[in-house]
Image: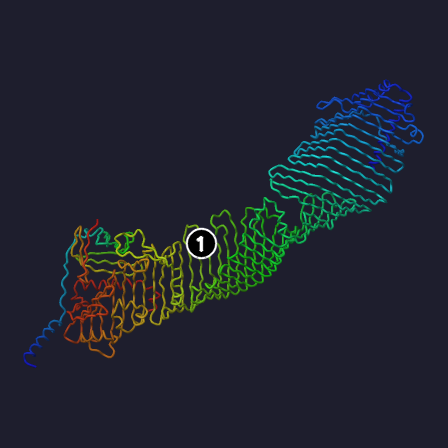
Amino acid sequence: MTTKKAALLSLSFLFIMAAFTGCIPEEPLPMVEYDITDLYGKWESGTEYYEYFSDGSGLCWDVGDGVYEDEAQEFTWEVDESEMIHIHKMEMGGDVPMYYIITELTPSTLKYYDAYNKADTYSFIKVY
Amino acid sequence: MKRWIKAGAITLASLLTLIIITVGIACYLVFTPARLTSIVNKVAAKYLTCEMQAVEIDLTLFSSFPDVALRLTDVALINPTKGAPSDTVAAIAQCEAVLDIKELLGSSSIVLRRLHLKGGEANLYIKEDGTSNFMVFATDSTAEEDTTSTDFTLPDLDIQEITASDINVTYRDEEAGQQASIEDFALTLNGQLKGKQLKGAIKSSLQQVTVSMEGEMPISATVSDVALKLNGTMDNTDSKVGGSLTIGNIKATAADIEAGIEALAWQLDGSIKDSYLTATTTLDTKPIAISMGGESPLSATLATAQFEAEAQAGGSRIFLIPTFEAKGVNVTMDKEQMLSEAEIGIFAPLTTDTAWQHIGISEAGISLNEYIITLSGGVHIPDTSTMDAYLHFETEYWDIPSLLTLVPDSYRNLLDGIRIKGSTALRGSIEGGMANGEMAISKADATLGLSRLDLLYNDSIALQSRAANLAVTYTGSNDRAVGSIEASNLDVAMTGLAEAQLEEVKGDFTFRRAMHIADGYIDAEAQLATDRLIASMNTMSLFTQQPVINLAMKATGAKAKPVYDISLHSDTLHAAMGSLAAASTGALSLDAQASYDEAATDLLAQWNPRVNVELHTGHIATSMLTMPVDIPHIEFDYTDGRFTINDSRILLGNSDFALRGDVTNIDSYLNETGLLKAELDFTSAYTDVTQIMDLVSGLGASDSTEVAEEEALPSQQNPVEEDDPFMVPLGFDVRLNTNIQSANVNGFSFDDIAGNVTVKDGILVLEEMGFTSDAARMQLTAMYKSPRKDHLFVGFDFHLLDIEIDELIHMIPDVDSIVPMLSAFDGEAEFHLAAETYLHSNYDPKLSTLRAAGAIEGKDLVVLDNETFDQIASLLMFEKKTKNVVDSINVELSVFRDKVTLFPFLIAMDDYKAVIGGRHNIDNDLSFNYHISLTDCPLPVRLGLDVNGTLDDMKFKLVPCKYAHLYNPEKQNVVQERTLQLKKIISESLKDNVKPQAKRME
């Protein structure tokens, strides 16, 4: 092995060691204070509907899947700055939490993404 | 000598004496008609209260000597009476009497040569107050009753000729509402009385008699062309009498009844010799017509009718043999011909005593055409208010088809479609009588016999029996009717549909208070037994031996609810439905009671049945089930709207279970006012769930498919064809409490399974089913709802405690898909899973509604050595050991729509700690994206590894460590802090559903 090759391997090892010695700090959440009253009401995204009530409850249904408004499933929701959590309470017991990060909330628009997969984004238009 | 003969003779002799005295007076004092008439008028005025008119009275003595003759012309009694049709009570145009004076004076014999009456009339009238116009004889109030005894001896009497002709009589009784008239009456009489010997002859005729009676049932009759002849001789030891009566025409009406006889001839011959009487009489009539009006008009005609009677009397016994025969009998009722050209006969030999207190009938008969009913019996009449009677009747076997020809045309429609062969006979008896003026039957019995019966109805229902008897006996003392039915065989068939064969059928029945049935008092019981019953219907068949059926009915009045009791007991019963199913039982017992209330509106409430059934050694085999069902024992009853299975044991394949419990609220369910409720205990020593599910899988499923509901929105992206899913019944509230000692599910053995299965108005719930297996203790709550065909809900809450992970994956293979890395571990874990989704009609999930949450906890798990682990360990520089033990894992996961989120969880193994988390999609290729952060290891590096792709195409990539501070509160970020909160929410929400019993088992 030549000295040049040895030096190149040493640099590479150092680079790898530098890369994996500690975890990369995660990107901080965009903590924004939204007007929560904008959330109240019925939102539409394609065939999917969400409706938020001021008491922290909500309904969701997807007519594309043959589910109509009077057959909607219930959930509870809470918003803390940009964090929005839906907890879907199953009839047999057990909670299914969904963790979202709001990126836009206006009287007519609601956008958020999945906290565990930023690529999963959602966009709704307010119906009323 | 008979009293009336003696009285008649005395009267006749007195009359002749008076005539002779009158003639004598006439001979000595009066020889001129004028003086004679004057004298007679004076005498009449003394003895009559009315006026007597006589135009001429002439007495001849010498011209007719030695006879004396008296002639009267136009003699009349005049007694005007208000309301009477005439002032003349009686009148005679000509009267001549000739008496032999020589015989009278010489031998004291009365010889009446002749007495001729011609052209007379009488108008007899009785007023409403009872007074009449013919009571015209004056009474001597001063006369004293002659109490001295007389030794009167009748003189010899020779009446050579008495004639009367052209006599008319009218009679009217206003008091009784009766009137009668006789027209053109004629009489010829002669007779002799010599010593104690009497002989004579009478001939009479009249043109017409009319009689009418008013009242509730007005009667009027007209008899014309009447001729009577009587002759006879009488003395103490030997008397003979002969006579005949002919009537040309009789017409009578009574209310709406009319009767007519065109000709009648009666002949009587009798003799009495040495106190022994013999007599024969015949009565012949030519056509008789009778008609009766009213709501059901009836008319009858008889071409000829003949009555004959022979009588013999001697000592205290009387023998009578009356015979009646009518031919050409036609009876029409309601314009319907009931009898046509029929022959009716009555033959009634009887014996009696002179007081007619004991009457016996022997070998009597009543016949209609060729059908004869033989009668015998007797009547005892000890006094006028008491009578006892006995009658036995019997027939030969009659050919039924011939017998049915007697059925009137108007009723033949009742026989439409009926073809019958065979013969029938009837016999029976009646005992009864009258006591204190009331009729009563003390005993009666009847037996109907059937021989070679072959009945076919509408070419579809057939009944055959070689011999059968139906007998009924009624006892009046306890008002009870007891009967029996016996048949050598009874074959019933519904052509092409069903047939039944019964052999040696025996039945008994009892009716208490039998005579009060019409009043609603019914108290009856019956028992039907047969040696063998074979029945079939289409491909169904039934065979039973020694079945006994008991029936009872009781009602206490017309308004009372009748109560029925029914019981069936059978030693053996086999039933089959072709190759589809077969069932057999050992001892079968069914007891039922019902009371009928017609005021109730629904069927169950109307009958209010009470039923108890007990069955032993039942066996059912059906093509729908691949193995038979054995029922060693079952007992259930239904009482007051409650159906109760008291005890049962059922063997289905490998399963052995018992059902007990109640089904209630049946009335409300039938009235559609409430749910049908049931609570049943399902107790089993062993239940093979897999086998049962395989057995019942597809039962009731339909091959037909329907398109999706028309109301589906056009926007529905993937309309699915609608199948015929299981729809949970509405209107039911059924709870099944299970207690299974051991069960097999997919090859796994579970013990002590306890929980409830509930169906309530469209919702099916498996509620907190707890059980244990070799691998785990378990608890399951599941729900299935079917609000509409294309929107079905299924959800469950499932807990596996202390389960071996490999058993868990074996038991629920889908777990390996949700948590793929789980298969890398070995050891005990705790698994909690709740999920729900709506389904399409074909049971495809509606992914937009899919929700699930799971939690897995494990300690001291061994990491299995496999290729994936080797690859991960190599990349993360794990120090592989022979046995790699994970201290603990706490996995929480969720499923929302088509995304599975595996919340980051920590694995600690020796000096290594790693956090694993990520997501995968429930899509076609189950793509996933997981991350493993090696947070602690002996090496100075912190490695991260992304594992993504699909199971078939797994990719590994070293990446920066993502969850280095997840479990470090001081360094964790907002998302990591929230993640731990969400993991806690999932875990606690699931564990809250573990019931205390299951927790205690931990």
Of all residues, the one furthest to the left in this rendering is A4
User: Could you say where residue B329 lies in the image, as x and y percent from the top left?
Assistant: 67, 42
The answer to which image quadrant residue B721 occupies is bottom left
The one nearer the camera, B414 or B702, is B414
Q: Nearer the viewer, residue B449 or B746?
A: B449
Residue position marked by numbered label 1 in the rendering: B666
Q: Amino acid at mark 1?
A: Ile
Q: Quadrant of residue B738?
A: bottom left
Which quarter shows the N terminus of chain B? top right
Relative horizontal placement of residue B382, taking residue B160 as reference (left or right): left
The answer for which chain carries disc 1 is B
Q: Alpha-carbon neighbours of circle 1 within 10 Å: few (<14), some, or many (≥20)? A: many
Is there any visible trace of residue A61 in the rendered image?
no
Residue B284 in view of the camera: yes
Q: Residue at x 73, y 51 (%)?
A: B363
How far across and down, in percent of the image, does residue B409 sit? 60, 44
Q: Position of residue B545 (x, y in %)?
A: 56, 63
Instruction: Label 1, secondary structure: give it.
Output: helix
What residue is shown at x 14% (from left), y 75% (from top)? Answer: B940
Which residue ends up furthest to the right in the rendered image?
B106
Tell me where residue B66 appears, x and y as whole percent: 92, 26
Q: Residue furthest bottom?
A: A1
Say which quadrant the C terminus of chain B sits in. bottom left
The image quarter in which residue B976 lies: bottom left
Picture residue at 31% right of the left edge, 54% below the top:
B708
The colour mode here is rainbow
